[in-house]
Image: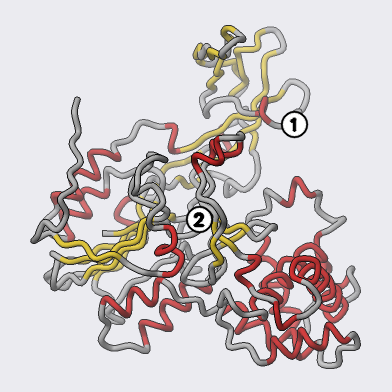
Amino acid sequence: MGSNQCRTRCSGLNIEKRNPDNKYEFLFNEKWEKAEVIEEPIKVKGKGIINYEVTVTRHGPVVSEFAADSGEGTVLSLQWTALEPSKELEAILKMNKAADWDQFEQALELFHTPAQNFVFASPDGTIAYKANGKIPFRKKGNGLLPVPGWTDEYGWKDYIPYEELPRIVNPKDAFISTANNKVIGDNYPYHISHDWAQPYRQMRIQEFLKTNEKLTPDDMMSLQMDQKNLQAQEFNPIFLSVLDKPTAVQEKEAIDLLKNWNFIDHKDEAAPLIFNLWMKNLYDVLFEGQIPSEMRKLFKGQKQAVDEMMRRAAEGTESEWIAEKGGLEEVLHKSLFLSVKEAEALQGKNMSNWKWGDYHQLAFSHPLSSVEPLNYLFNRKGRIPVGGSSVTVQAAANKDDGTVNHGGSWRFVIDTSNMHTAFHLVGPGQSGHPLSRWYHDQLNDWAEGNYHQTRLDEQSSKNQLVLKP
């Protein structure tokens, strides 16, 4: 069994009208309803107690005090499936006892939130998939924007029936894969989400699996560390055909590197640095001055939107975003210019010395390490150059400064014909104790893809973990 996030729209904001004469009452269908008030005293060292109240309307807790003013006499409340009672622990216990897919699927019915893509494989050859969880469908709207909470016109109507959730059992292709990608077709009767991951990881997984008839654990470990960038394979030729006559020397040199690139985001190559910075600066050129920086942080579908803009522009249909910035050629020229300048500032003017891994580095910084001198206790000294990117199977998304902050923390491969042997990587280590030898002993292996074999039919270690009540 395995799982990853299914990007469902399982929450929504409601605009609540507050009674001017009683701050604990809110309007619903022309009547004032009393909210539930939960006292949550917060003890602060050296400051005493902060008497904090959580106000809960029929839709959920009021959250607008953590945002900008929501308007006179109104507040925002959050409706979210995770705030409802659920039985995930019972579901997991029953999953672990399931003898076949039917029992496993019955156990899944108890797993409500967060919605997940579950995959299943058993020694009898059965493979299956289910997008599982409580996913609401609405009377009006799709959850993207706050809706009036003083009327039942926009409320949640119900949840998608369990038997109608996306599901696959023993498909004709003889494999199942998911990578946070869109899991439904356009004819699916319910709205699940607008916010799917870019499709390139899923596309590469399927490309790999379809070209290999017989796969071994070594093949699957190689796939999990695969660094082929299908976004670059799609757009690099388009971009270079538009900029076919570069004028600046540095721009020409960058384009020559991109022309000879094999689209592998290897840590020791310059082309991945140029292309990935180019995409980052492309977003900035298109949206700078148009969308405030604080709003940009909330623009989760930014990458997907720009991908589609570029596709349409290449087909001759430029969006207003591109046209207002001078057209596709000007947008690409400016964003490449900015990328070259950024790379020069980071790694010097000699492009032969540029490396993706000198910018794209792994840290696994502990949250408490932001306070000195705890960083010396919780963090390993130095960062590790890594390949991959946000769109490769070896998921390695990064912040603007190059710090890798997203990826598969646990990688796992098993051949169901031999359930006694498996291969694992847990980054940065198996222990959460900073003084343990296993705290970050797998960090280098996680970065390089050196898997550890574990066996259930033999005891190869003298180390024991003893849990005492």
Q: Nearer the viewer, mark 2 or mark 1?
A: 1
User: Does label 2 or label 1 sit earlier along the sequence?
Assistant: 1
Q: Quadrant of residue 198?
A: bottom right
Q: Which residue is mark 2?
A: 191
Residue visible at 69% across and 79% down in the picture = 311
Identity of the residue drawn at 81% across and 72% down: 335
In front of the other: 20 or 468: 468
When asked about the image quadrant of residue 382, the answer is: bottom right
Q: Position of residue 290 (x, y in %)?
A: 85, 56
Q: Amino acid at mark 2?
A: His
- The answer to which of 104 and 45 lies nearer the viewer is 45
Q: Identify the residue under disc 1.
A: 68
**Image quadrant where one finds the N terminus:** bottom left
Which residue is painted at 33% across and 75% down in the image?
A: 220
Distance between mark 2 and mark 1 Cα atoms: 29 Å
Snapshot quadrant of residue 83: top left
62 vs 41: above or below: below
